[in-house]
């Protein structure tokens, strides 16, 4: 009998497969094609205390083996989210992770406090969105700021806190240690890598925002390396993500040291990707006689 | 109406005009598709991750076939143009909401690669139809197939066929009238029609396009600005893939 449960900051997931924030809405659209009950957790699109309109279009551009996005964290604000999306997700036997975004420390704290009496399992704090000028990345590229925002969020959070880290830094382990020092319960990485595409026919930027976040298989080796380095640097559980398209990719992240994984861009290429990855991990465990998935976590060291 | 992903089979493909291809695929989606909806078509080359949204040109529910007429716009559509009879092709759909079916005396207006979705609408709509098609040049793809659905007028940019000019030049020049207009085509054409519809007090439905990723309303890439706050987004944005691609023109900016 194989065992696929993992524990993330004290919360048991039935398997380590989560959705990556922003690629899956709050699950409603994909629930017609994916059985959400099969997923370890659904991570929602980032929610702020008030509605955000996001960036002008075009907001996405395809690149070789990946895509750039600059959605700009469009979201309906906490009230609509709490009234509509949380009750929707509560219908399913999966964990609910709410991704939180803000422009100021007060914004983050406001959302975290509003969530304190909501039936959700974990909070993921987005301090690494490359597409909004204020907030987001401003908090994620300086270790002192990472530690301070983590501490402040933790002071007000009722649920365990995952800090989502940016890869757009010289040394991600510095940010990981700062989040750990601030009291984070877990880390998730990587957010997207800042990129740019130019339309050579129109001689303009492909994205209205000029720059956007690179995701998809093109970033996977960078993400695996950063998960590995971070796993060596801190004792916190890690949610690994970045270009996971298949179960094989997910297993790579587990072996590198991730306790759970998040699937993002793959949903656009294959709407059933999350569920197929759950099934593929089970098949891998059967093939290699892995009885407990925890045997895989961080199994590759030297 | 639930969308799904499945493997369709290519029934036939032909080039209608330089760079314009007509692809018939066999899929159960033909049983539920409606005029104005679209299909997401996936590439076989794994370096191209995102499906290409392509409007439905014709629906044959009996033979379970859909017709997609598209223009080669990049490497993805270039790949599709090499598909031949019997090839499998991954698709998701049917996506979006179709055209509303209203009006007693209507204009169906297509510009360039916005012409194809008008064909199934022309076939299904029980109204007096005047069909105005705008082309670049004398490659009048699909024109003949509209003839059995209503009166067809043609405008060409270079004057090589029909009226030299655009679709509005035809409408004004011929003194055409309607109570509802349906349009798909380049944004400048749609903007001009919106202004005309406002002046004349005619209801206008437009089919919009934008760069898409998920195609199902989750990623918020393909939004358009709206006049009123949208109930789903709680901001002045609507999702073209999920809430559109057809909108009442006065409700959206494009």
Image (spheres, helix red, strand yellow):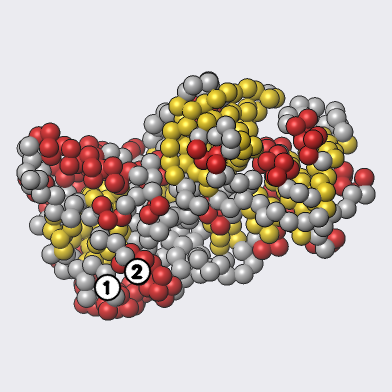
Q: Which residue sits at x=37%, y=58%?
A: A27
What percent of the width, then of the height, locates residue A233?
A: 12, 52
Say whether residue B52 is visible: yes
**Is residue A135 found left or right of B145 in the rendered image?**
left
- Asked if A299 appears above or below A231 in the picture, the reply is above
Q: Label 2 lies in what chain? A: A
Q: Which residue lies furthest to the front in this view?
A: B62
CB contact under 8 Å: marks 1 and 2: yes
Q: Which residue sits at x=43%, y=29%?
A: B44
- Asked if B94 appears above or below B63 in the picture, the reply is below
Say whether residue B189 is visible: no
- Asked if A302 appears above or below B199 in the picture, the reply is above
What percent of the width, then of the height, locates residue B129?
A: 81, 46
Q: Is disc 1 surrounded by few (<14), some (14 to 19) or many (20+) residues within 10 Å?
A: some
Q: Which residue sits at x=25%, y=52%?
A: A38
Secondary structure category for the residue under label 1: loop
Q: Label 1 lies in what chain? A: A
Give whichever of discs 1 and 2 has the lower sequence position: 2
* Inter-mark Cα distance, 1 to 2: 8 Å
What percent of the width, then of the height, locates residue A196?
A: 45, 44
Occupied quadrant, residue A72:
bottom left
In this view, the residue in front, A77 or B66, is B66
Secondary structure category for the residue under label 2: helix
Residue receiving disc 2: A86
Q: Which residue sits at x=63%, y=28%?
A: B22
Where is the C terminus of chain A found, in terms of image quarters? top left
**Is residue B107 found left or right of A267 in the rendered image?**
right
In this view, the residue in front, A135 or B83, is B83
What percent of the width, then of the height, locates residue A284?
A: 16, 37
Occupied quadrant, residue B72:
top right
Q: Which mark is residue A119?
A: 1
Occupied quadrant, residue B43:
top left
């Amino acid at each position: 009998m194989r065992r696929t449960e993992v524990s993330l900051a004290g919360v048991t997931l039935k398997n380590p497969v989560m959705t990556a924030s922003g690629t899956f809405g709050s699950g409603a659209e994909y629930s017609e094609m994916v059985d959400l009950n099969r997923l370890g957790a659904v991570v929602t699109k980032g929610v702020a205390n008030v509605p955000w309109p996001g960036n002008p279009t075009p907001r996405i551009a395809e690149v070789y083996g990946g895509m750039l996005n600059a959605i700009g964290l469009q979201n309906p604000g906490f009230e609509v989210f709490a009234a509509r999306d949380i009750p929707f997700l509560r219908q399913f036997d999966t964990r609910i992770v709410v991704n939180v975004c803000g422009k100021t420390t007060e914004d983050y704290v406001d959302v975290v406090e509003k969530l304190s009496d909501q039936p959700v399992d974990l909070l993921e704090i987005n301090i690494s969105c490359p597409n909004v000028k204020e907030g987001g990345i401003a908090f994620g590229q300086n270790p002192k700021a990472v530690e301070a925002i983590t501490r402040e969020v933790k002071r007000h959070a009722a649920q365990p806190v995952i800090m989502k880290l940016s890869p757009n830094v010289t040394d991600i382990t510095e940010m990981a240690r700062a989040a750990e020092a601030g009291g984070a319960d877990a880390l998730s990485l990587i957010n997207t890598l800042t990129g740019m595409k130019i339309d050579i026919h129109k001689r303009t930027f492909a994205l209205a925002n000029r720059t956007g976040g690179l995701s998809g298989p093109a970033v996977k080796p960078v993400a695996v390396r950063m998960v590995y380095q971070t796993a060596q640097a801190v004792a916190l559980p890690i949610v690994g993500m970045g270009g996971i398209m298949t179960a094989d990719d997910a297993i790579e992240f587990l072996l590198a040291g991730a306790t759970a994984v998040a699937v993002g861009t793959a949903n656009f290429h294959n709407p059933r990707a999350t569920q197929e990855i759950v099934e593929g991990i089970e098949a891998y465990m059967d093939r290699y006689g892995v009885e407990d998935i925890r045997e895989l976590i961080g199994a590759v060291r030297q | 109406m639930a969308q799904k992903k499945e493997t369709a089979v290519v029934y036939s493909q032909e080039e209608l005009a330089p760079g314009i291809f007509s692809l018939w695929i066999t899929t159960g989606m033909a049983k539920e598709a409606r005029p104005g909806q679209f299909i997401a078509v996936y590439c076989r080359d794994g370096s191209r991750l995102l499906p290409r949204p392509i409007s439905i040109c014709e629906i044959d529910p009996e033979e379970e076939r859909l017709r997609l007429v598209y223009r080669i716009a990049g490497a993805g559509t270039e790949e599709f143009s090499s598909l031949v009879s019997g090839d499998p092709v991954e698709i998701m759909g049917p996506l979006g909401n179709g055209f509303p079916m209203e009006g007693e005396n209507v204009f169906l207006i297509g510009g360039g690669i916005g012409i194809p979705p008008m064909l199934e609408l022309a076939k299904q709509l029980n109204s007096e139809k005047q069909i105005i098609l705008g082309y670049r040049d004398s490659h009048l793809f699909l024109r003949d197939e509209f003839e059995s659905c209503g009166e067809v007028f043609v405008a060409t940019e270079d004057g090589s066929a029909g009226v030299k000019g655009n679709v509005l030049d035809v409408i004004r020049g011929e003194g055409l009238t309607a109570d509802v207009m349906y349009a798909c085509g380049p944004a400048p054409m749609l903007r001009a029609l919106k202004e005309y519809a406002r002046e004349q007090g005619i209801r206008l439905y437009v089919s919009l396009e934008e760069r898409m990723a998920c195609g199902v309303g989750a990623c918020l890439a393909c939004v358009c600005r709206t006049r009123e706050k949208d109930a789903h987004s709680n901001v002045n944005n609507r999702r073209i893939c999920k809430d559109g691609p057809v909108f009442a023109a006065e409700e959206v900016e494009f």
